[in-house]
Amino acid sequence: MSRVLVSRPRFDGRAVDTHDPPRHAPREDLPASSGLATAGYRSAKYTPEEWLANNYTLLNRAVAERSAAENICHLSKNLHTETEAGTQRTQADGTRHLGERLQDIHLWKSELEQHIDKLEAETGLLLKEKGRLERALNATEIPFSIATDNLTCRERRLGPDLVKDCVEDELLKEVELVKSVQALLRKTLDQATSQVKTNREVKQMLELDWSDKFHAYTLDSLCGRYKSTSTNTQHYPSSAKLQEQVSNCESWASFTRLNLAESARAMQGSVGLRQLVQQVLQETGEDMRAQSCSVEQAFSQRCSQLTEAKVQLENHLTQTLQQIGAQEKNLASLQQALYDKEAPLRVAQSRLHQRANRPNMELCRDPPQLSLVNEVDEITNTKSALQQQLCDARHSLAALEETRMALEKDIACKTHSLFIDREKCMRHRTRYPSLLTLTGY
């Protein structure tokens, strides 16, 4: 009977222990199964040794797997404990850092709020001073118009009164002073406008910084309230990446520090400018009022001089008129005297004429003849003297009339000048602004 060889699957024990027995290959010394009766029972079966080896391998594998599982459970428990504590510690550190950050943000935000309030208040004060400057600048138009109007009115003075006197000098000084004050006020007003613009720009910069910090404070406050039990958290895998072009703590604090320094500089400049504005308004107002007093004093002196000159002229005019009256009476008296000499002269000449007709020896130079000749000569000389006196009196009267006309003309000039200085100029100067108005109140 021939030997029948049947193949069987190869056993793989996959033993955990390295000392496990090796797999058993089919033994060559076992009796081969033969015969048709045993052919179906012998296929794909293991030997007892193989069974024992397989069982031993499974037991060792179970032991090794349990040991490894116990080790993994121990390590997992330790890792869980450590990671839980680390996670809580890290989260607590994060919460603490957020709290510290909130304190820093709140500190800088409070500083910004204080500077914003101070800058806003300072800008309001500066705007008030700017309004004073504008009102003071508008108020200078009245003194300028008064001074120029006074100069224009005084150009209408007549004759010798059109003189460059101390009043005109003071008025010219007043015009130059008002022009210089207006230029200074405009310059100071431009500085105030520029400073107000700077204050608002700095305030806007501080408000933007404060707004950013307020937003950051809100976000960090929200982040500080997050807990592991919070239901409004989500996964953001890419959030742990560091963003590019971000600031660090030093540059963050330096940015706000620079803004506060800029605010301090703006505050200092604004306070200094307000003090300058107050000083400029006070000094310019006092200068203009002092010059106005000088002009009014010069007007008063000039009016006094004109009044005194007018009184003197009027006195001389009165005396001149009296003298004219006397001279006219004198002329009438001289004319009457000349007229009165006509009759005696006619008598004497008639007597001489008649006696010249005496005949012969009767025509002699007797005492009557000599007396009549002397009488005619005396009357003729008297008439000549009276004629000369009459001529002198007429010249004197003409001179007195010219003097009267000159006095009346000069009195009219003085009256006109007094009217201009006293009624026009000095009354117009009563509209001169007060010191409070000139200082912008």
Image (cartoon, rainbow, N blue to C red):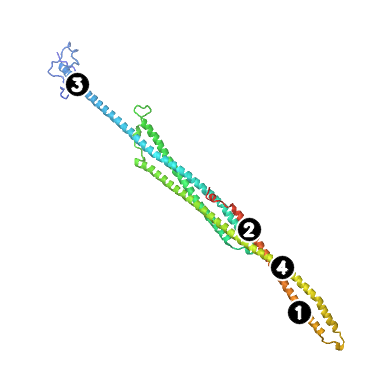
Q: Which mark is residue 7?
A: none
Measured as percent of width and height from the top left, residue 50 is found at 16, 18
Badge 3: few (under 14), some or many (20 or more) residues near its Cα, within 10 Å?
some
Q: Label 2, secondary structure: give it.
A: helix
Whole-Å distance between the Cαs marked 4 and 1? 27 Å
Residue at left offset 41%, top offset 36%: 215
| Residue 19 in which image quadrant | top left
Q: Of the residues tagged 4 and 3, which is closer to the observer? A: 4
Mark 4 or 3, nearer chain start:
3
Q: Which residue is mark 1?
A: 381
Badge 2: few (under 14), some or many (20 or more) residues near its Cα, within 10 Å?
many
Q: Of the residues tagged 2 and 4, which is closer to the observer? A: 4
Q: Which residue is mark 3?
A: 63
Mark 3 or 2, nearer chain start:
3
Question: Which sits in the foreground, 221 or 161?
Answer: 161
Q: Label 1, secondary structure: give it.
A: helix
Q: Which residue is mark 2?
A: 420
| Residue 151 in which image quadrant | bottom right
Marks 4/3 in contact by CB < 8 Å: the verdict is no
Q: Which mark is residue 324?
A: 4
Amino acid marked by disc 1: Asn
Whole-Å distance between the Cαs marked 1 and 3? 190 Å
